[in-house]
Image (cartoon, rainbow, N blue to C red):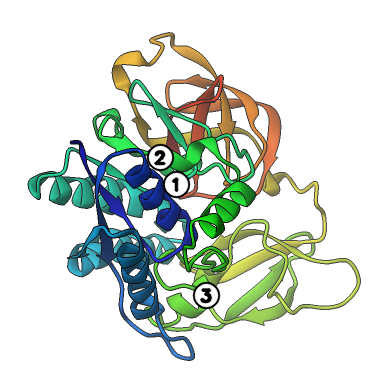
Amino acid sequence: MTKIFVGMSGGVDSSLTAALLKERGYEVTGVYMKNWTQDMPGMKCPWAEDLADAKRVAVHLGIDFEVFDFQNEYKQKVVDYMVDEYKKGHTPNPDIMCNQEVKFRLFLDAALKRGADMIATGHYARVENSNLQMAKDTNKDQTYFLYRVNGEALARTLFPLGEYTKPEVRKMAEERGLMTASKPDSQGICFVGQIGIRDFLSEYVEQKPGAIIDKQSGERIGTHDGAIFYTLGQRHGLDVGGGLPYYVVGKDMDKNEVYVSRDLRDESLWRHEIKLTDIHWINPHSVISDSETKLQIRVRHRAPLVDARLDGVVLHLAEPERAVTTGQSIVFYNDGVCLGGGIVAP
């Protein structure tokens, strides 16, 4: 009997994943990944509650259950990476790094050592012949966050929910009596629950007030509490003036200055070309060797797919994209298959 270790977070998606795999005849073990347990000011980390929910579901399903403690590695590989990137003025995605370093490396390796044949998670995605394909529910599709996983890991991974929509998942969970069927989806930072990135970063970096400058006039029009907290295209949280809204169009980390404009057509907000670094191909052997590869790209989760041409490390876009920021991930697709992606270079 094939032995599957299922990453169970205490939510409805991973709960139904475990239930479906058991029904399909697999020997299922539920695993809670203990990645982060630190409380933040005004926000209690929900890990204990999530662990309890995952345990209850495992008992309900009659499957074995274990806890893998990855706190030290998670702090180093995901949290420290994120904070360091923000300090540089970049906009990283910790969920992507979590998948690369923790769920599909640490968890997979630990599961295989414990006797598992494969792992499974509640991600909305599909795998066919080690290729990562978009989920049936395009609104919930999570391939954007999985582009840095390699084909070898995907060959040992199951994504049962890739064939269903979110409403179908909740209905199926309810029909099976899973107590997480109506549990709300987690929001905010992947590892701290509801807390926002600004509040989280405030625990790691000193607030340094600086000038908010109107790019067109060069005048100082306000004060911010740290350029690190602002990102390109941001509109809210500026607290400057009335009338038409201002948008962040740039920042200088050395001077601790944030530049804003009311002009949505400001050239700083739009990119026709994007230079990438740290490009990752899920299956390098299947990549077209043409020096100018035609792709569709997604510049952020749920953003529409845009035609592009990759020439070396430079993407040439068919249509300009707004607010593409350094450190952000650009993900490549071809006919519904996620090929990989890269990180926006400075």
Residue 305 screen position, x and y as percent: 64, 32
Disc 1 crowd rating (10 Å Cα; few below 14, some 14-19, many 20+) is many
Reading the image, the residue beneath label 1 is: 123
Secondary element at tag 3: loop
Residue 265, placed above or below residue 194: above
Left or right for 269, reference 20:
right
Q: Earlier in the sequence, mark 2 or mark 3?
A: 2
> Disc 1 vs disc 2: Cβ atoms closer than 8 Å?
yes
Reading the image, the residue beneath label 3 is: 194
- Looking at the image, can residue 244 be seen? yes
Disc 3 crowd rating (10 Å Cα; few below 14, some 14-19, many 20+) is some
Q: Which of 197 and 323 is in front in this view?
A: 197
Mark 1 and mark 2: Cα distance apart in space: 6 Å
Residue 307 screen position, x and y as percent: 64, 23
Left or right for 68, reference 313:
left
Secondary element at tag 2: loop
Reading the image, the residue beneath label 2 is: 159
Q: What residue type is labelled 3?
A: Gln
Mark 2 and mark 3: Cα distance apart in space: 25 Å
Q: Which amino acid does label 1 sit on?
A: His
Residue 340, placed above or below residue 260: above
